[in-house]
Amino acid sequence: MMNQLLAAPLALSAVLGLPPIPSPAAPLEGIVTNACERLTAGEVLYPTYGAKRVTFATAKSYGATEVLITGCAKKGEEYVQEWQSRGFAGRSGFAPPGEMWQDTLYSPSGSFSFTEALGRKNPGTRLKYHTINRLSRWGGEPGPTYNQYFEGKDGGADEDLWFYLRQGDYEQAAVINWNREPDMPTVQGASFAIFLHAGNSVTAGCISTDLETVTRLLVSATPGDRIVMGVEPAVYAAGTKTTPGPKADGTRNATAPQPAMPHAMARVVAGVAGAAAILTGVVVIARKRQRLH
């Protein structure tokens, strides 16, 4: 649309001998919260315990299911962005404080470690890796296997990992240590099987994104790396400055706002439009005079 609007004024400016109008700037990359910069500045409200790598999964507000996923790596005293992607949280969005419970379809809010992973084949991660087979389960039944990997008969509420592997969701997955050691004691009924996994669709409580992003995270992950999850107002300190995040390899599905027209360019276009209107008026008057004679 912008190109069509500018085509006529550009041609007219050449006819009238006006200075050329500069071409519009290329579309900007999506401007997003620079999670890594804010982590370095101490503006993240959840603790990260000096982890070498911190992944952020954030939504704009409670109830929102689309999330921005950002991978940060510690370089010296700073965290720098390695990659960025889009994904989805649970169908109910992120849980407000005190509302994370089984079958609510919330994703948990907070800071959690990565120590285990699972999938079709180990991509080279240093996390403890479970290669999924037909007997692979994630415990959902009350008892010692609750929110743990095990192999055996499905107890009914247990999650059949083989089924979800074949669906594509658990082709690769990192286990988020919500409601389990080493982050916290396991509470029966406080939800289980919270992963960052492939599939790239709304979930029952996990974080889902594309397979490439999950694999990249696993390849670089070490035990103790963390993920910070939640809505932006609960993750970042209020009133702090937000700057555009750097363009990084692996940025996917970002939408870029259309750039505003520069003031100088707007003035030129306005002048050209005015000249066009005057010229049109002169032509109309001349034609009327011709018809009168």
Image (cartoon, grey):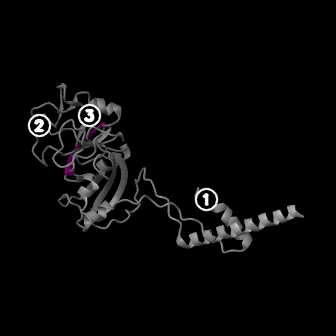
Disc sitting over residue 132 in the figure: 3
Looking at marks 1 and 2 on the same chain, the residue that comes earlier in the sequence is marked by 1
Q: Nearer the viewer, mark 1 or mark 2?
A: 1
Q: Is residue 111 magenta?
A: yes
Q: Amino acid at mark 1?
A: Asn
x then y, percent, for residue 56? 28, 54
Q: Tell me which numbered mark, 3 or 1, is placed earlier along the sequence.
A: 1
Q: Amino acid at mark 3?
A: Ile
Q: Disc 3, disc 1: CB below 8 Å?
A: no
Q: Which mark is residue 188?
A: 2
Vertical arrangement, residue 208 with respect to residue 73, above or below: above
- In the image, taking residue 242 as reference, residue 260 lies left or right, namely right
**Secondary structure found at label 1:** helix
* Residue 73 located left or right of residue 1: left
Instruction: Judge depth for marks 3 and 2 and give the one in front.
Output: 2
Q: CA distance from mark 1 to mark 2?
A: 60 Å
Dot 1, how many residues are within 10 Å of its Cα: few (below 14), some (14-19), or many (20+)?
few
Q: Which residue is mark 1?
A: 3
State the quadrant of the C terminus. Answer: bottom right
The residue stretch that appears in magenta: 110-120
Crowding near the residue tagged with mark 3, few <14, some 14–19, many ≥20 C-alpha atoms within 10 Å: many
In the image, residue 32 lies in the stretch drawn in magenta? no
Question: What SS does tag 3 mark?
Answer: loop
Can see residue 53? no
Tell me where residue 86 appears, x and y as whole percent: 37, 49
Q: Which of the 4 quarters of the picture holds residue 25?
A: bottom right
Q: Secondary structure at mark 2?
A: loop
Mark 2 or mark 3, which is nearer the start of the sequence? Answer: 3
Q: Is residue 11 left or right of residue 226?
A: right
Q: Residue at x 30, y 62 (%)?
A: 36
